[in-house]
């Protein structure tokens, strides 16, 4: 546990692609950043399979390996890491203060790269079923569902990637989407539609999860949004891929957000308040790509370095 009296030059909140890139740049600038990794070190990339569109990897790279490489790179330059999770934020003093794991930390500059978390449907019994046949991570849980039918809810690139990955294990993968075509990029949509193991169910939503006597998922109740027809679909697991919510709870009411809760930035990475910089999916409601997160992490670190150097002149 860090002593309360310690003043940090830079604290980075989050250890996904944005946070680790910021850590690399800040560490190379001899700022010795402290990275608060939170409860999901590595962010969304840590649960991604093959990353094919990150520059410099012509054969692709597994998400967890990319995160591990970036973590080592930042550490080699002098970044420090803690699993502490930020739960409160204060700008009343001259410097920014963060409350993490039962203590206040003070810093001259903070880079908020806390990312976003998977969104669920909000149906009855949802929380009880998470981990019992309901998940948002195919790479985490797909291997547990070999030779049984599963379904993916969603129609974007994430849903397409989840569905394709699950064909390695499941006997059948249903893709349930409220529209009549996928929103995914053309290359991902084509892969899904050409895969014999995947069956799309169009214009349909899940209205209820059905569990067996042991409390494990065994089916979902479906409703066609056009015909209103309802039916049950037997599946052993439901993989939800309908988007994410920004991890901004600790900053709510203290930093500016858009209506969906994403942090607002000025220029490339500056927050409205001095010493606050923002990077990655916590502010990006449009692109949500590893490469754009990395770019914003770089910008945030460079802006933080410029901000800190202004006090040394």
Image (cartoon, grey):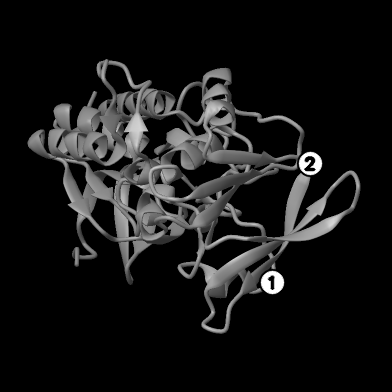
**Residue 271 drawn above or below residue 87:** above
Would you name the residue on which mark 1 appears? 124
Element type at marker 2?
loop
Quick one: label 1 or label 2, which is nearer the N terminus?
A: 1
Q: Pick whichever, 13 or 56, lies toward us.
A: 56
Q: Residue furthest right?
A: 227
Residue 2 disc label: none
Q: Pick whichever, 126 or 39, lies toward us.
A: 126
In the rendering, at what x and y percent does residue 259 appear?
Answer: 70, 43
Can residue 152 be seen in this snapshot? yes
In the rendering, at what x and y percent does residue 200 appear?
Answer: 65, 39
Give residue 223's quadrant in the image.
bottom right
Q: How many marks?
A: 2
Q: Pick whichever, 73 or 4, lies toward us.
A: 73
Would you name the residue on which mark 2 appears? 203
**Residue 125 drawn above or below residue 62:** below
**Residue 295 drawn above or below residue 223:** above
Which residue shows up at 89% across the image and 52% down it?
A: 228
Nearer to us of marks 1 and 2 is 2
In the rendering, at what x and y percent does residue 312 appear?
Answer: 22, 28
């Amino acid at each position: 546990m860090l002593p309360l009296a310690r003043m940090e030059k830079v604290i980075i909140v989050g250890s996904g692609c944005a946070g680790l890139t910021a850590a690399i740049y800040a560490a190379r600038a001899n700022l010795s950043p402290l990275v608060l990794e939170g409860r999901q070190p590595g962010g969304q990339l840590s649960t991604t399979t093959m990353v094919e569109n990150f520059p410099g990897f012509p054969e692709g790279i597994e998400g967890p390996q990319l995160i591990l490489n970036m973590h080592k790179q930042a550490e080699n330059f002098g970044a420090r890491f803690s699993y502490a999770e930020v739960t409160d934020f204060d700008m009343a003093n001259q410097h920014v203060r963060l409350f993490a794991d039962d203590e206040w930390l003070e810093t001259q500059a903070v880079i908020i790269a806390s990312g976003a978390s998977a969104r669920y449907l909000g149906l009855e019994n949802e929380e009880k079923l998470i981990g019992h046949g309901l998940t948002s991570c195919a790479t985490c849980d797909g291997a547990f569902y070999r030779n049984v039918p599963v379904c993916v809810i969603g129609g974007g690139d994430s849903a397409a990637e989840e569905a394709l990955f699950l064909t390695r294990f499941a006997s059948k993968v249903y893709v349930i989407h409220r529209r009549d075509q996928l929103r995914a990029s053309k290359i991902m949509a084509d892969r899904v539609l050409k895969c014999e193991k995947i069956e799309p169910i169009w214009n349909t939503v899940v209205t209820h999860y059905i569990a067996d006597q042991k409390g494990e998922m065994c089916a979902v109740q479906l409703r066609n949004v056009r015909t209103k027809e309802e039916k049950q679909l037997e599946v052993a697991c439901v993989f939800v891929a309908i988007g994410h919510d920004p991890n901004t709870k600790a900053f709510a009411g203290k930093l500016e957000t858009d209506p969906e809760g994403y942090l607002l930035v000025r220029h490339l990475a500056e927050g409205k308040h001095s010493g606050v910089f923002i990077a990655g999916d916590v502010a990006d409601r449009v692109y949500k790509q590893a490469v754009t997160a990395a770019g914003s992490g770089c910008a945030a670190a460079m802006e933080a370095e410029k901000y800190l150097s202004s006090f040394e002149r």
